[in-house]
């Protein structure tokens, strides 16, 4: 089965992201707006208890933190994705590294860039038009990151929560 690890921003940020995702993200109905902390990976039922234990340990030693969402950006020309950028803080970097260690270690073809996708799978022309207007938005969002979720993919391609992990570390 396919799993992944993500965190969800606060509702007002999700609502803002969804106002664009409805139109520009074909995965809109598959998963709420999120920040991916661990790319999709395959795991069988036998390893799941070890994965949960690993993630529980990470959550126990992680303190909640706020993240600033300063702008709309794009991964073009690598891929035609428009996203809400999240500041790549030391908190995010450490959290990503802890999750992607031990039993979950996996080499990634991309650098970790925390973000909330709002548009993808667009033609070059559509991407340039949409990004041209969205980058003018003054975005001064902020959200609290105080938990993450082990997600799994259903047969229809949508993602749902397997288990949530509340941060328990102190600042």
Image (tube, rainbow, N blue to C red):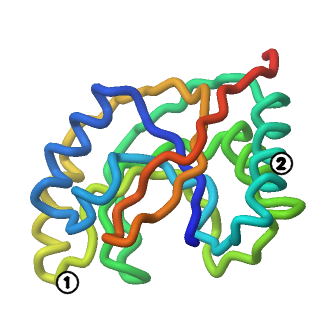
What percent of the width, then of the height, locates residue 110? 61, 75
Quarter of the rendering containing residue 50: bottom right
Q: Is residue 19 above or below residue 40?
A: above
What percent of the width, then of the height, locates residue 67? 54, 31
What separation in Å lies between label 2 and label 1 (alpha carbons)? 40 Å
What percent of the width, then of the height, locates residue 96? 71, 51
Q: Residue furthest right?
A: 102
Q: Nearer the viewer, residue 85 or 169?
A: 169
How many other residues sit within 10 Å of disc 2, few (<14), some (14-19) or many (≥20)? some
Q: Is residue 83 above or below residue 140?
A: below
Residue occupying the point 30% across, 63% down:
82
Task: Determine which residue is flagged by label 1.
Answer: 124
Quadrant for the N terminus, please: bottom right
Dot label at residue 54: 2
Q: Is residue 105 above or below residue 52?
A: below
Question: Number of marks in the image?
Answer: 2
Looking at the image, residue 90 sits to the left or right of residue 135; the answer is: right
Residue occupying the point 56% across, 25% down:
66
Q: Please tell me whether mark 1 sits on a helix, a strand or a loop.
A: helix
What percent of the width, then of the height, locates residue 132? 16, 62
Looking at the rendered image, the disc whose residue lies closer to the viewer, 2 or 1, is 2
Q: Please tell me whether mark 2 sits on a helix, a strand or a loop.
A: helix
Q: Residue furthest front?
A: 46
Dot label at residue 143: none
Looking at the image, residue 7 sits to the left or right of residue 112; the answer is: left
How many other residues sit within 10 Å of disc 1, few (<14), some (14-19) or many (≥20)? few
């Amino acid at each position: 089965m396919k799993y992944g690890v993500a965190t969800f921003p606060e509702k007002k940020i999700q609502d803002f992201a969804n106002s664009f995702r409805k139109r520009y993200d074909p995965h809109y109905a598959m998963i709420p707006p999120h920040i991916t902390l661990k790319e999709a990976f395959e795991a069988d039922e036998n390893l799941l208890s070890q994965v949960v234990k690993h993630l529980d340990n990470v959550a126990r030693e992680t303190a909640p933190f706020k993240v600033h969402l300063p702008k709309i950006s794009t991964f073009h020309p690598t891929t035609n994705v428009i996203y809400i950028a999240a500041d790549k803080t030391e908190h995010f970097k450490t959290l990503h590294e802890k999750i992607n260690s031990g039993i979950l270690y996996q080499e990634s073809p991309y650098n970790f860039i925390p973000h909330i996708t709002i548009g993808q799978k667009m033609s070059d022309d559509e991407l340039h038009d949409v990004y041209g207007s969205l980058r003018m938005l003054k975005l001064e969002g902020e959200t609290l990151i105080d938990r993450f979720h082990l997600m799994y993919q259903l047969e229809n391609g949508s993602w749902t929560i397997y288990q949530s992990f509340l941060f328990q570390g102190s600042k």
